[in-house]
Image (cartoon, rainbow, N blue to C red):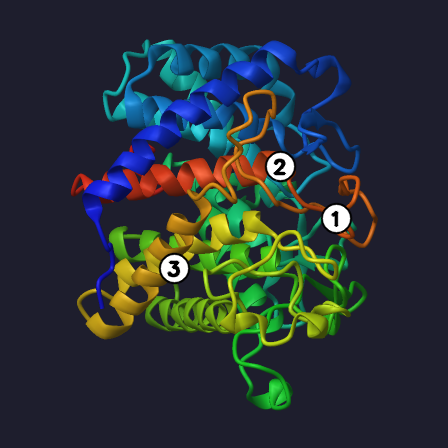
Amino acid sequence: MKIVPNKESLQKKLDSFWVLASEKVRLVEKEYDTSKGSPVFTKNGKYTNRGWTDWTQGFQYGIPLQIFEATENQEMLEIGKENILNKMAHHISHFGVHDHGFTIMSTYGNLLRLATTKRFTASQGDLEHYRLALKLSGAVQAKRWSRTVDGKGYLYSFNGPHSLFVDTIRTCRVLVAAHKLGHAMHEENDTEINLLQRTIDHAMTTAKYAVFYREGRDQFDEWGRVAHESVFNTNDGRYRCPNSQQGFSGYTTWTRGLAWAMLGFTELLEYLEESNSKIDDLSYVKQVFLKASRATCDFYIEHSSLDGIPYWDTGAPNLHKLGRYQNQIANPFNAFEPVDSSAAAIGAQGLIRLGRLLKSSEPEKSRKYTAEGFKILETLLSETYLSTDIEHQGILLHTLYHYPNNWDYIPDGSKVPNSESSMWGDYHLTELCLLVDLILKDRYYTFFDGIN
């Protein structure tokens, strides 16, 4: 199995991508009015705001930092740095969201990593600024804590203390970064909270309740299915039921939530494999995370189209009208159910990272997961998914936000949303391209590189 069909061809596509992404950064910087709020997704090619929670601005300013890392384009670095300095401070202490790993790691996390790895020169004051942002953000997110009946717990979503979102698994990176910087959260009576242990507890709860394994309580379910939301009784901490906010139901799989799990678990595994952290039952924790990573990645592969693109929910009510969609190339312009290319961009990175984790122990499995991730990237870099219209502000086409709430734009003549972009889709495609660009150059990076 060839993982990369043609490295030279793929590198040329990536080089072209960086030019395109730079043009889009300039376009948004020139045209978007940030006084209207953070850009969330496009409508007829123009970024718009959607008030729910303010969680996308970090992606906006993280994109140019990643372009800089790949290309050394100083203009992109300055756009990122200036906007982070002037517009991101209030996100650090935002107690109303569970998204700090998205907003703060995409900005201050990238800045610290680039500075400490000598990609640009930062003053000692700048470095301490970046570090303090990560420390405080990790503590703010860690404060969103609900206890479960077993004495562990989870970081609750903006829905309230009863609610665990599967996507929070990827935002836990900011707790890990704060821990790596030597920070701890202090609660009442000066009780010290170990931020890495809090991350582990949240991820273990997520693996136990949000991911299904076709065993025990899941005996009639599918291997690797994921529930977007897990609901708990806050009086006694007992699990009650699965639910969904952006998917079709709690008994089907919203594919972007699935992708967050694929990537979140593999990144935590990478950290545990490379760090010397003292964690109770470390061997068992890694076993649980690996099982969750395998299961979610297997489910994604099984329920995606032939080119690696998933539809928005594996139980979407009209999906059956597309026939055996897994054996076909995805059709973003179909009349029945929308695809979500942002789930593909997120999931591809999870597949590639899992492949690397298994490279020594299970080479065949490693090649399978890695090849699937590269296949998705090749699809996303095609004309169907790249926004090459010079007036369209997005980078990645055919992403979806909240289909049940009817928030996504449906172009004239279409039956379902298509041809639009989102800040998380643009960011994660850029992040995926950076990872693969480095791999092609025999390098690699993780979120915790340079966090010191």
The percent position of residue 206, horizontal first and vertical second, equals 57, 64
Among the two numbered marks 3 and 1 on one chain, the one whose residue lies closer to the N terminus: 3
Query: Residue drawn at (75%, 51%), measured in percent from left and top?
Result: 416
Residue placed most toward the observer, 206 or 263: 263
Real-space Cα separation, disc 3 to disc 1, in angstroms = 24 Å
Residue placed most toward the observer, 40 or 19: 19
Query: Residue drawn at (66%, 62%), measured in percent from left and top?
Result: 254
The percent position of residue 288, horizontal first and vertical second, equals 43, 72
The residue that mark 3 highlights is 351
Among the two numbered marks 2 and 3 on one chain, the one whose residue lies closer to the N terminus: 3
The percent position of residue 332, horizontal first and vertical second, equals 62, 52
Q: Mark 2 or mark 3: which is in front?
A: 2
Among the two numbered marks 1 and 2 on one chain, the one whose residue lies closer to the N terminus: 1
| Residue 272 placement: quadrant | bottom left
Q: Amino acid at mark 1?
A: His
The residue that mark 2 highlights is 422
Q: Amino acid at mark 3?
A: Leu
Residue placed most toward the observer, 420 or 314: 420
Q: Is residue 259 left or right of residue 154?
A: left
The residue that mark 1 highlights is 402
Q: In the rendered image, which quarter contains the N terminus?
A: bottom left
| Residue 382 placement: quadrant | top left
Q: Which mark is residue 175?
A: none
Query: Residue drawn at (69%, 15%), measured in percent from left and top?
Result: 34
Does 202 appear above or below 408?
A: below
Query: Residue drawn at (63%, 32%), measured in percent from left and top?
Result: 56
- Tell me the SS state at disc 3: helix
Q: Amino acid at mark 2?
A: Ser
> Exactly how many numbered labels are in the figure?
3
- Tell me the SS state at disc 2: loop
Q: Residues within 10 Å of mark 3 (few under 14, many from 20)?
A: many
- Tell me the SS state at disc 1: loop
